[in-house]
Image: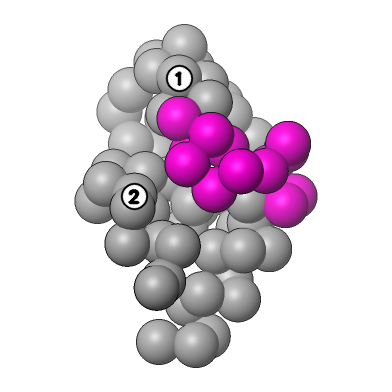
Amino acid sequence: MDILNNLTERELEILEILSQGKSNKELADSLGISENTVEQHLKNIYEKLNVQNRTEAAGLFLKGKNER
């Protein structure tokens, strides 16, 4: 089972930008949402992926993306 299948389209969009090394502010600006909303999405992503931080999340995203 692909762990990324548990994520919403918005969460995948956030991970795509996150994997480019963007900050929360840059994420928020590029998506037209607040930094608080980005932080909430990241919290949900970490929980769904069972990771502790953005580096782990980005790593799983890139690994999953390459396996597709």
Residue underneath mark 1: 40
Spatial separation of the CA atoms under disc 2 and disc 1: 14 Å
Packing grade of label 1 (10 A; few <14, some 14-19, many >=20) is few
Q: Main secondary structure of the magenta part?
A: helix
Where is residue 15 drawn, in percent x and y? 49, 51
Outermost residue, left direction?
Answer: 9
25 lies left or right of 11: right
Task: State how many labels appear.
Answer: 2
Instruction: Find numbered disc 2 in the image and state the secondary structure of the residue it sits on.
Output: loop
Nearer-the-camera pick, 21 or 43: 43
Q: Secondary structure at mark 1?
A: helix
With respect to residue 62, does 40 lie above or below?
above
Q: Amino acid at mark 1?
A: Gln
Locate residue 60, reporting x and y percent. Answer: 62, 63
The three-letter amino acid code for the residue at tag 2 is Leu
Asked whether, in this view, residue 51 is left or right of residue 12, the answer is right
Position in image of residue 9 (x %, y %): 24, 51
Where residue 61 sits, quadrant-wise, is bottom right
Q: Residue at x 32, y 62 (%)?
A: 5
Q: Which residues are magenta?
A: 44-56
Reading the image, the residue beneath label 2 is 7
Q: Residue at x 41, y 61 (%)?
A: 4
